[in-house]
Image (spheres, grey):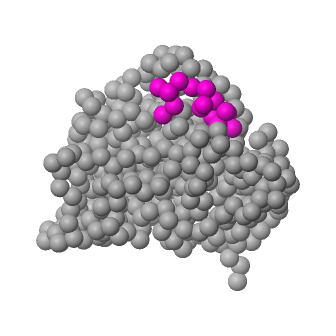
């Protein structure tokens, strides 16, 4: 399938598909898109962007940095991705944030499950470069399936992988590069195991308005036109889940179109409005987590009415707060290097040399996954190097259960894996296998 890259515009990630020149981008950006499509793997995409970003005009650098952060996310460099493409939490100057006197924190999955009991459409969004915004979707899948939801629509899926449901797991060509990130792959695996019918629905169209309408039309045709009694769970990006105009300017979002087509008001859940920045800066997110410290995906409910809090209830029904990446963080560490390999990404991008090198604690998925230590010895002195943990019976093309990219020698990290048997494979920028071994995690 055609490779997609994305650009955040007013809270929306807009895919760029060929012909890229049809979009309103500079010649340098168009060249970058075309050359990025030629890269053979995620590590090569990382290296390409690392090399090209300093050459771009300043006007193109934010776009390129978003793409770079998405690749970091796909390589298991989660804190680095959040650091390199910060999304600030903006609120109107006259807005009032909730206070502990009137509101209390509650487990997001539990509250949403109660709210979804009499709903037929549930929409949840993500920030494409921050896999933390996928944790709640994974937790909701079994709960919504138990309520009778039978269709799961995934923005990152392509309709060209006709064997996905039978195979039971996604591969590199099952969708966009976003799907290469392990938690996203876990979402798809879990949905198949639970018996959901998977629905690809993204629309390859030129304008923002065409894409929003196209997504809604695809969902209507592929779900409700065929099954009028369907119950649908949708995992989308950014403002697609909004039920009113605002974050996309005068463009009507996908959810607004879908409600018009079906006559069904969706339950819309936002995870992107109040997000962490690394390093932390005073903003609405910091104020909220200071007043309501979350230990997992959290929503706020009114102490008197039980109603969930939304900063824009006309757009979405509730806001989700995620704990900071440092909460329960595990040091992946850079030990004193014995090699002379530089931390090249910091050098070239002129970002701060001092960066939180932890892998975030949320990767345990509330203790469903166990940390498994790895070191650069797996890379056989070749860097950069990616270590993939594949389920033992799945091929290299399958989306890994977890992965981590080492950028220099003599370093250590941890993979987060459910109990079971895995095949560790280390590979280099050309995709060549450097080492393989079979491991067992959580054996008693």
User: Residue, x 36% and y 39% (percent of image)?
Assistant: 11
Residue 267 picture location, percent across and down:
28, 52
Depicted 361 relative to depicted 207: above or below = below
User: Residue, x 56% and y 49% (percent of image)?
Assistant: 352
Residue 250 picture location, percent across and down:
25, 29
Q: Residue furthest left?
A: 304
Q: Is residue 60 magenta?
A: yes
User: Which is more toward the observer, 53 or 148?
Assistant: 53
Q: Which residues are magenta?
A: 47-62
Q: Is residue 249 visible?
A: yes
For the image shown, how many numbered marks are present on the structure?
0
Q: Is residue 404 left or right of residue 201?
A: right
Q: Residue furthest bottom?
A: 444
Q: Is residue 29 magenta?
A: no
Residue 275 picture location, percent across and down:
39, 53
User: Which quadrant does the N terminus fall into?
Assistant: top right
User: Residue, x 33% and y 49% (percent of image)?
Assistant: 89
User: Residue, x 39% and y 33% (percent of image)?
Assistant: 9
Depicted 293 relative to depicted 115: above or below = below
Residue 353 picture location, percent across and down:
60, 51
- Magenta stretch, main secondary structure, is helix
Q: Is residue 327 left or right of residue 422?
A: left
Q: Quadrant of residue 410?
A: bottom right
User: Which quadrant does the C terminus fall into?
Assistant: bottom right
Q: Quadrant of residue 423?
A: bottom right
User: Which is more toward the observer, 83 or 229?
Assistant: 83
Depicted 151 relative to depicted 208: above or below = below
Q: Is residue 229 visible?
A: no
Depicted 398 relative to depicted 142: above or below = above
């Amino acid at each position: 399938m055609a490779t997609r890259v994305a650009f955040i515009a007013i809270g929306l990630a807009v895919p760029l598909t060929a012909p890229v020149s049809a979009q309103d981008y500079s010649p340098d950006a168009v060249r970058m898109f075309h050359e990025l499509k030629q890269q053979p793997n995620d590590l090569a995409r990382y290296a390409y962007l690392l090399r090209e970003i300093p050459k771009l005009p300043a006007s193109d650098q934010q776009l390129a940095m978003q793409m770079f952060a998405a690749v970091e996310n796909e390589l298991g460099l989660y804190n680095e991705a959040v650091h390199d493409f910060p999304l600030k939490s903006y609120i109107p100057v006259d807005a009032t944030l909730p206070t502990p006197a009137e509101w209390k924190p509650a487990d997001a999955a539990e509250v949403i499950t109660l709210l979804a009991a009499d709903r037929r459409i549930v929409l949840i969004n993500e920030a494409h470069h921050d896999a933390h915004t996928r944790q709640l979707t994974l937790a909701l899948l079994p709960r919504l399936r138990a309520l009778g939801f039978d269709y799961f629509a995934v923005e990152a899926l392509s309709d060209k992988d006709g064997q996905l449901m039978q195979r039971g797991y996604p591969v590199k060509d099952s969708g966009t590069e976003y799907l290469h990130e392990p938690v996203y792959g876990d979402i798809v695996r879990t949905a198949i195991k639970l018996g959901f019918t998977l629905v690809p629905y993204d629309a390859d169209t030129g304008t923002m308005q065409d894409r929003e309408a196209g997504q809604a039309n695809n969902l209507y045709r592929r779900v409700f036109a065929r099954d009028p009694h369907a119950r649908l769970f949708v995992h989308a990006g950014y403002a697609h889940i909004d039920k009113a105009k605002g974050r996309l300017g005068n463009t009507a979002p996908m959810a607004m179109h879908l409600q018009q087509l079906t006559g069904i008001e969706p339950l819309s859940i936002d995870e992107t409005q109040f997000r962490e920045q690394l390093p932390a800066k005073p903003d609405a997110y910091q104020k909220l987590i200071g007043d309501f410290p979350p230990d997992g995906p959290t929503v706020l409910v009114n102490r008197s009415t039980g109603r969930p809090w939304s900063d824009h209830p006309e757009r979405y029904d509730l806001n989700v707060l995620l704990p900071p990446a440092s909460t329960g963080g595990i040091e992946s560490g850079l030990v004193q290097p014995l090699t002379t390999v530089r931390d090249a990404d910091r050098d070239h991008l002129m970002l701060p040399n001092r960066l939180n090198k932890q892998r975030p604690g949320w990767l345990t998925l509330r203790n469903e996954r166990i940390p498994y230590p790895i070191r650069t010895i797996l890379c056989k002195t070749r860097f950069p190097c990616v270590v993939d943990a594949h389920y033992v019976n799945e091929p290299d093309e399958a989306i890994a259960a977890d992965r981590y990219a080492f950028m220099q020698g003599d370093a250590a990290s941890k993979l987060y894996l459910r109990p079971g048997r895995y095949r560790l494979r280390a590979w280099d920028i050309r995709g060549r296998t450097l080492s393989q071994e079979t491991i067992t995690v959580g054996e008693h």
